[in-house]
Each structure stands twice: as structure tokens, then as C-alpha cells.
Image: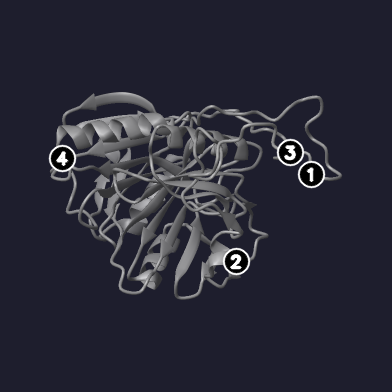
Amino acid sequence: MTHPSVQPPQSGIEGIDAITFSASEGPEAWARVNAFFKDFGLKALSNTPNHQLFETLNGSLVKVVLPGDSSYPVAIEEGPTLREVTWGLRDLGTLDRLADALKGQRGFEDLRSTHAQIKAIDPHGLVLVFQLSRKKDLRIVGSPTNPYGAVARVNQASPVYERATPIEIGHVVLFTDQLKDAQTYYESLGFVVSDEYPNRGVFLRCGEQAGHHDLFLLQVPNKKPGLNHVAFTVRDIHEVFGGGLHMSRCGWKTQLGPGRHPVSSAFFWYFESPCGGLVEYNADEDYLTAEWHARSLDPSPSMFAEWAIEGGLDGHTRRQPLAEKPSGFLTEKKG
């Protein structure tokens, strides 16, 4: 995540431009994918029997292909999953730098002369594409807050969202069985460690100045490489709630949320995805610079979530599932 009022990440990598998933075959599964991402708030651009394309507000793309698509190597895990991550770059100098760094490594393809791209395969077998960023420069501002002593919202109510419209693809989280090698690989491309769970996980951002993480590598005992989740950035906590409640009304299953991550300060809501793993609404993460010192943290449940609601909230009652629908004003006493 870049911020409009500060300089871009020094690595020249500006975040995720596109992701590609594979989904299960069959008309019913294909229709379910299309409904899921439209309900999630993405703009549908195309839908054919073997390819779907969606867009966030800033032009980041979500592509969905069939598992046997010959354009991609063998997936990093069985079933629907992540097939490719496209990283957007600031300039051609960054593209040349990365070409030099990746030349001779697994899966390297130099497409600079035809597509202004290069490709590689990371240690897990995931396809990476690097290109000049094609995202739109937006000036979207979330609702200001009024913390004690710093009033920013005057004569203005905070918004209530009926649904979410994600701004950008915020980050990707991968399971790994080779944490140190994968960390070294991404650091060699210019990624910077923000925080870590020693021998368990590492949060990496695209450069010195960036959101808390664009990539999180998580090593769990006896867990093979695969997709954990993809996060989509929305305006503020209110849009996290609005999007989550809308997804609930549409019948999609919450894995966890709403909640808040202490490690990044971000608010979240996770949903099970028909493309494998989870997708997340994410807002209000920390923004870091070179002044930040990476922390070694205990990977405890309280570090993962300061608070969280398992199973989500019912989109109709606005309460936890099975909670009684309110029949009066919140503070009215019964009896």
C-alpha cells in the first residue's frame, strides 16, 4: 500500500497490480466465483467459460482461470488456489534492476521488449510478474476520526456503508515450508522486513516506505506451501463492517471477523473463498518508514487478534449469528 502524501517505496515496487486464482471446473462452481467477487464489491469486466476478470477501484485486477490452464505451471497446491501475483513497479529502471537480480533463476522470462514485463517463479512455485504499475492514482479518503485531543470530524457523521467497494489489493499471505529461503528471495528483490514471528513468519513490505506488509510468509508445522489469504483494502473500519454485513446477507461464510490485528493495527473481516483460501477486507494498517525497527513477536492468539468475532455478524440482525433480533432501542430494558 502506498500513500499519496509520501514518496514511493525506495525499492521501486509499489504493490500488487494483479492476482490470478484458479477455480474448480463446472458451470455451478464458475457461477459461484462470479457471484462471490461481485458481492465482495469488485467490478466484473469479463466472464467466459475459461476466464473471469474483475477490477478494484484503482484498477488492480483479479483474474480467475481453470485449474488446467496451460498458461500456468503446476499449482503450488491442489484445488482452487493462487496461481500468479503481478507486482507493479515505479519505473523501467526498477524493471531492469529486477531483471538483473532474477536472471538465471527459476522460471525467469525476459519480456521487456514485447510486454515491458519480466516473470519468475518464487521458491514455492508461484508465478511472479513484474511490470510498470497500471493502477490508477486515486484520491480516496476514509472517514476522519475523533480521538481524544485530536478532533478531525466536525459537524459530520461517520458513514454507514451498505456494501464495500475495495480500493486495491492490499497483501498476500502464503504458507511456506522454507521460511528462511523464501525470506531471502524476496529481500533480494527489495522487500523489507516489518516484523517477524521467529522461525514462524515474516511480514514484508515493498520498500522502506510502505504499508505494514504486502506479503506475509507463514510457516506452520507439517503445512505444505499454499495460499492463506488475499487482503483487499477498503476506506475505513466502517466499510469493513458494511462490506462484511453485505457478504453475510448474501450467504457467504465468515471465517473470522470483524476484528483487529495488533501487529499491523488493521481492522479485518475474513471470508471463505471459492478460489481457495480466504479473502479479507482490510483497513487502517500501520504505515512504516526507514525509522521503523522490525520487532520479534510471540505468535500468540492475542497477537493475531486483539479482538475478533468467530462466525461474523448476521447481516440482518447486525448481531452475532443466532442472536435475538433487537425489538427496541439498544438501551431499552426488557420487562
The numbered mark, 4 or 2, whose residue comes first in the sequence reads 4
Front in this rendered view, residue 88 or 233: 233
At label 4, which amino acid type do we have? Answer: Glu
Labels 3, 1: front one: 3
The numbered mark, 3 or 2, whose residue comes first in the sequence reads 2
Determine whether 45 is above or below 225 in the image: above
Front in this rendered view, residue 11 or 261: 261
Q: Residue beneath label 3, please?
A: 331
Q: Residue beneath label 1, please?
A: 147
Question: Could you classify mark 4 by the number of other residues whose Cα lies within 10 Å: few (under 14), some (14-19), or many (20 or more)?
Answer: some
Q: Position of residue 134 (x, y in %)?
A: 42, 32
Front in this rendered view, residue 23 or 1: 23
Tally of numbered discs: 4
At label 1, which amino acid type do we have? Answer: Pro
Q: Which mark is residue 294?
A: 2
Cα distance between the residues tagged 1 and 2: 27 Å
At label 3, which amino acid type do we have? Answer: Thr
Q: Which mark is residue 273?
A: none
Residue drawn at point x = 51 percent, y = 49 percent: 257
Labels 3, 2: front one: 3
Cα distance between the residues tagged 4 and 1: 49 Å
Question: Could you classify mark 1 by the number of other residues whose Cα lies within 10 Å: few (under 14), some (14-19), or many (20 or more)?
Answer: few
Display coloring: one colour
The numbered mark, 4 or 1, whose residue comes first in the sequence reads 4
Q: Residue beneath label 4, please?
A: 25
Cα distance between the residues tagged 4 and 3: 50 Å
Cα distance between the residues tagged 3 and 1: 24 Å
Q: Position of residue 59 (x, y in %)?
A: 43, 30
Cα distance between the residues tagged 4 and 2: 43 Å
